[in-house]
Amino acid sequence: MIKIPTKVLIVDDEKDFVEMFSLRLQETGERVFTAYNGKECLDILEGEDIDVVVLDIKMPGMDGIEVLREIKKRHPIVEVILLTGHGAIETAVTGMKLGAFDYLLKPADAREMAKKLEGARKRKDEQEDRIRKAEARTLLRRGGNI
Amino acid sequence: MTQTRLLLVDDENHFRSPLKKRLQKRGFMVFEAGDGNECQALMQQEAVDVVVLDVKMPGMSGIEVLAWIREQFQKTEVILLTGHACAADGVEGIKNGAFDYLTKPVEFDHLVQKINQALEKRQREEEKKQEADFKARMEQQMVATERLASLGTLSTGIAHEIDNPLAIIRECTEFMRLLLGKTEDAVFPRKKDFENAVGKIETAIERARRITHQLLGFVRQPETVFSETDLKALISETIEFVKKEAQNKKVEIVQDLDKAGGKIWSDAYAIRQVLINLITNALAAVTSGDIITVSVRETDLLAEIRVEDTGSGIPKENLEKIFEPFFTTKPPGKGTGLGLYVTAGIMERLGGKIDVTSRVGQGTVFTISLPRTRKACSLMGDNKDICLDILNTIKGDQPND
């Protein structure tokens, strides 16, 4: 069975982390994009059709929550998984309220991460499916009117 | 108000006795002494507020007695009686710390007035001292709080900083695992050794992560929330929680809760955490057939919970160290050494105390005492959380503020 790669965008200011994480995801067959800050992340989202963003909350400059807000405003369909430190559960909750798919405590377990990525991808697919169907319905209705 | 205690020191009996009677009529409690030595002996027996002291006496002079009183009893005020217009004696006395002097023959009302003035002065000084003590205590407490806060900030900072590289190391090992899994054994002859090494790194990461999380957990404890807490139910519930582990070890946990009264004013969540820590510790110290007893005793002010085990006991040299952070006798990687440190911290927040007695080979008893009521909370000392709780209650009671 051929796996359809998930397009993952990793956003974290820790370069080594981003590098290793993306290597590993590529190895498991995903398509990986990387960004080291919020601005880069938003730029990539403009050009690429990303499925899931893995977003670190604590970053210099624009922090994860701000980036999340921007993502949800500009690309509401893109799913976001937050990476947070242990003491920042409140921030994670804020993130969930803003529409993040889920959050993981750093250092995150690989199996858990894989599970969440899969879940996020699935939700996005379903969402897209619904949108397609809704569009089809409107088209049909319009067609009937003619 | 308690009766004012006076001491009359004069060698002339016919002067002393009537004065004593008249002062008693005014409500004073009066002691007498005929000379300096008697005065000294009496003052060592009885607490005296004000001494009315004749300067001219055989043996020890009034001035000498005054010097002695100043040295031994700083709080006692002295009024000197000088004879025959010897103002110089009086002035000398004031220089040496007497409150004032009166010239004989003494006008009675004048003396009573002086005594009352001396008492007022004494009271003012007492208040001043109390105020100073209170201030010093507050300052001391502020320093302690600040130190704790900066320790907290420091450890959170360190924990966070360590979590980040840990995340990188973890990613690396996951990646190596992935690659190893895809490689044929034939291509990679020492694959097993590599896998073994990666496994060790993973265990070490997990260990470091546990420490950082516990540190962050200690710093970011949830705010203490005081409410009415049913101690009996809480203990039973907590024991239920650890029962399985006890059964696995073939250890019996006995509850002796008959002496527990009703409810106490405390934080149930925090007490549960303390109990779990203590019982888990006890479970680690016992072997098959041992018994762990959890009992409660209550007094007017305190509720005392004892967690007693018949396990291996704690050697004397370790007993002082068990509450220190990172002290552990478990093999590396098994315990973080933060359990009792955190427990003691919680007890302090609750305004309580934790004590331990232990004998090697016989077992260990941990006793925690908790204030039972809000009033008892306030008596237990100057604890920030408790002060806040009381403050909130006061605010709640008086909405008009």
Image (cartoon, grey):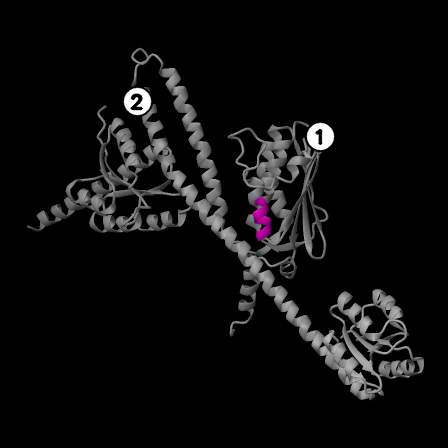
Residue B362 visible from this viewpoint: yes
Q: Residue at x 26, y 26 (%)?
A: A27
Q: Secondary structure at mark 2?
A: helix
Sequence-earlier tag: 1 or 2 = 2
Type of amino acid under label 1: Gly
Magenta span dominant secondary structure: helix
Q: Residues within 10 Å of mark 2 (few under 14, many from 20)?
A: few
Figure check: A106 above or below A75: above
Instruction: Find out whether residue B348 is within the magenta segment.
Output: yes
Type of amino acid under label 2: Leu
Q: Position of residue B374 (x, y in %)?
A: 62, 60
**Image position of B116 (left or right of B401):** right
Q: Chain of mark 2?
A: B
Question: Which quarter of the rendered picture does the N terminus of chain B lie within?
Answer: bottom right
Query: Residue B140 lies in what quarter of the image?
Result: bottom right
Figure check: B162 above or below B32: above
Q: Secondary structure at mark 1?
A: loop
**Image position of B159 (left or right of B28):** left
Q: Position of residue B321 (x, y in %)?
A: 62, 39
Figure check: A13 above or below B94: above
Residue B179 has which mark?
2
Query: Residue B198 lies in what quarter of the image?
Result: top left
Residue at the top extreme, as displayed: B186
Q: Position of residue B208 (x, y in %)?
A: 45, 34
For marks 1 and 2, give the CA distance.
51 Å
Which residues make up the magenta segment? B343-349
Instruction: Find out whether residue A107 is within the magenta segment.
Output: no
Q: Chain of mark 1?
A: B
Q: Residue at x 78, y 70 (%)?
A: B67
Q: Position of residue A74 (x, y in %)?
A: 20, 50
Q: Which residue is mark 1?
A: B361
Of residue B87 and residue B187, the one placed in the foreground of this image is B87
